[in-house]
Amino acid sequence: MKISSLGICRLSPAVLHYRMLFSTRVFSAPQAGFRRVRFSSAILGGLAAMAWLGGCATVSDRPGDGKTARDETVKLQIVLDAWKFGPGVVDGHRGEFTDKALEFYREAKGLPKGYLPDTSNIQPYTTYTITAEDKAMIGTMAEKPEELAKQKRLPYVSMAELLGERFHTTPGFLAELNPGVNIEALPVGAVVKVTNVHRPFRVGDYPSAYPAAPKSVASIRHVYVDTKTRMLEVRDSGKLIAAFPITPGSEEHPAPLGDWKVVKAVPWPWYRYDEGVLERGERTKVYYMLPPGPNSPVGILWTGLNRPGIGIHGTTSPDTIGRAGSHGCIRLSNWDAATFYTLVQKNVPVTIR
């Protein structure tokens, strides 16, 4: 596999260690036996999404209280997520990113304030049967970078992590949906309740089922990274087509403001771990190449910009998107990163503001 050098996207060793130990991912390049999803065309995919999502309706901008409110929020989050307006994790909590995604959805559809998607036909939850393939994806993570560099992959470390990422939610919300169930102890064939997202993220389907955009989009698409609202927008000839919550650097290591462009998009990247870069922003001769995997410090995708070491990439901790800081780069959840991969190409302009 081609190695990409990503060392200047600085993560502190302590944060890197913590995320690797307690986050949720597995490297698995597409292998035989994984389910493959193929779409005949973008038009058919769009029609299928429209049929699944239904129409729109004017309703209260805030659902009621209790479990009903939670389930209604899950349905809203599912719809926004399916239309590529990421609400963050799908967990039934009506937070800032759900509201921001809703605002972007309204803009894209030309809808007035107070107009909400019709979710009456959406089932918020479904069931999933654990497979032997799922079990095989669970592994362990070494504690030191020199030991991590010896691993063949940076895997999911728990079944709850795997299922959380697959269904765009968190291990905590899965526990809430399955009270009294020890998800880690469930055998093959066991059934769990999960969020009914439109497109579960299966690592075996990436990138084969996530085709890159044609090269021609470089002349009509533009990515905007808003460091204040912590949202990333993708526009096509000025029209908003997608928006995702992000972590855009930190106060200590802010994302570089200005106009840039995409120079490459690398699924399943290798990561150059260099403490000199992490601590001082200087490359040294002592570094470790960490293998790919969803538990990589840059997740499942590295989209490099023409500013060395700065890129838009995945994460090991989707529940911290927009909250915890990064070191100059722009982080997306892995499922949003997979979708972002389908929207951009080399030379697409990126404005960080």
Image (cartoon, rainbow, N blue to C red):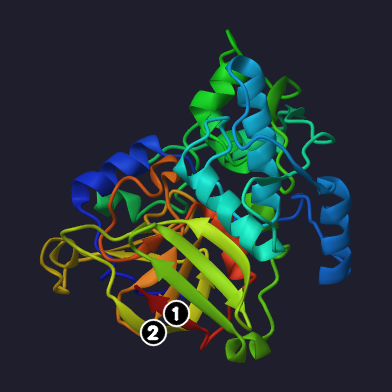
Image x and y of residue 128, in percent: 74, 29
Specify whether residue 242 is in view: yes
The residue lying furthest to the left in this view is 280
Q: Is residue 88 visible?
A: no
Where does residue 201 sit, x and y in percent of width and height? 65, 48
Residue highlighted by disc 1: 350
Image quarter in which the C terminus is found: bottom left
Q: In this view, does 266 lie to the left or right of 254?
A: right
Name the residue nearer the viewer: 195 or 120. 120
| Residue 81: percent from left, percent from top | 64, 49
Q: In this view, does 51 lie above or below 277?
A: above
Q: On the image, which quarter does residue 3 sit in?
A: bottom left
Q: In which quarter of the image is residue 109?
A: bottom right
Check disc 2: other Cα within 10 Å, few if <14, some if 14-19, many if 20+: some
Residue 210, numbered label: none
What residue would you read off at disc 2?
A: 260
State the image quarter where residue 29 is shown. Answer: bottom right
Q: Mark 1: which amino acid?
A: Val
Q: Is residue 141 left or right of 164 when viewed as pictured? A: left
